[in-house]
Amino acid sequence: MKVGIIGLPQTGKKTLFQVLTGSELREQAGPAKPIPGTAEIRDPRFDRLVSMYSPNKQARARIDLVLLPKMEQENIAKGDIFKEIDDVDALCHVIRAFEDDSVYHAEGSVDPFRDADMVNGELIMHDQIFVEKRIARIETALKKIKDEKQAIELDLMRRLLAHLEEEKPLRLMAFNEDEELLLRSYPLITRKELILAFNVAEDQLGDTTLLEKMAGQCRQNKMEAMIVCAQVESEIVLLDSEAEKTEFLQDLGIDEPALGIMTRLCLKALGLISFFTVGKDEVRQWLVRKNSPAPVAAGVIHSDLQRGFIRAEVMKYDELMEYGSEAELKKAGKMYLQGKDYIVTDGDILNIRFKV
């Protein structure tokens, strides 16, 4: 599952992608193409577990990212950008909110609210054009041969069109199982979860005005929003020690790098949660789909664990932190044995009992 990073030219997408993935990008010759990469999930819970267990090895979970070509009018007019967007599972729209006379803006001025609306409008327009064409094809086919399945699809498409004409993204709509199955094969971009990342100047960090102004729109359109300063994030990753990073953040008056928040929002957009396995040998973070039963989570670790699943020994992260050790947790009766119907929740610490 992949998160696509989109945005207008000169918004800081490339800088954020480089910081997230640890890669250094060169200017591409010829037509711009999607650039894949992976990013570590920066989760404070993982760091605390590593501190508690002092393992020989540690491994964070990673997510796949794709830096998509900039949303220039030429790319939008050709439709190429939408083909690339269709290949990802969720979107992160990087929006310029910093003033810098040396960096041009495609629209001539910095206005993050305008830019957010403009890109959202382009995505809605793409879906509307597709749905209109699909309706025309079905109507033509039904004039020749009556088909119940196509008649049902036509009704669905008309519902989608009415929704899009109100300038609303399709992720706001609810569908039954049959409709979901049908819609999966269609390139409907506004069904994807969307994160807005406002790239601000350093002196804007800690200012929540932008987020407060966007709060209503985010609720209405099921979007997540966050503040990031790509320039600051690129400086943080160059610091050698965690102590230096902590001091740097404290000087700025922020609790953690914005990239940690961004990767966790990406997880949420993908419908994924984290669980952990711990011990002296290794502390590892894993990802699994939300609402997955324990055997499915076991299968993420290794297929043998899912095949031979017997029980899951479960510790709750917050309870482990509260009691301070596994031994104290067991004394308090807070170590839980769960069967195959147990639904794994975010932050669970699992020890899988199995037999193959």
Image (tube, helix red, strand yellow):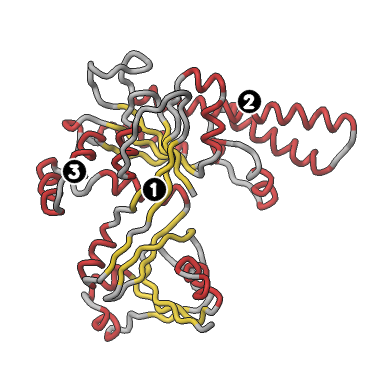
Q: Is residue 61 left or right of residue 173?
A: left
- How far from the left and from the top, in percent, is residue 311? 47, 81
Task: Tell me what residue is drawn at x 44 percent, y 47 percent.
Answer: 269
Image location (x, y in percent) of residue 42: 29, 53
Mark 2 Cα shell of 10 Å, populated few (<14), some (14-19), many (≥20): few
User: On the picture, is 310 further left or further right than 252?
Assistant: right
Q: CA distance from mark 3 to mark 1?
A: 18 Å
What residue did someone put label 2 on?
129
Residue with the mark numbered 3: 238
Q: Residue at x 26, y 43 (%)?
A: 258
Residue 299 drawn at (x, y percent)? 50, 69
User: Along the horizontal axis of the image, is 164 left or right of 49?
Assistant: right
Is 112 located above or below residue 172 in the figure? above
Which residue bears the numbered disc 1? Answer: 38
Circle 1 Cα neighbour tier, 10 Å, few/some/many (<14 / 14–19 / ≥20): some
Q: How many marks?
A: 3
Foreground: disc 3 or disc 2: 3
Above/below status of 258 relative to 331: above
Q: On the image, which quarter does residue 98 sit in?
A: top left
What residue do we see at 33% from left, 21% from top?
Answer: 111
The answer to which of marks 1 and 2 sits earlier in the sequence is: 1
Tag 1: amino acid:
Thr
- In the rendered structure, the answer to whether residue 243 lies left or right of residue 89 reads left
Secondary structure beneath label 1: strand
Q: Which amino acid type is marked by label 2?
A: Ile
- Residue 55 in percent (x, y) is at 25, 71
Residues under labels 1 and 2: Cα distance? 33 Å
Q: Residue furthest right?
A: 145
What's under tag 3, amino acid-wise? Leu
**Which element is circle 3 on?**
loop
Viewer-closest of 283 and 136: 283
Disc nearer the start of the sequence (3/2) = 2
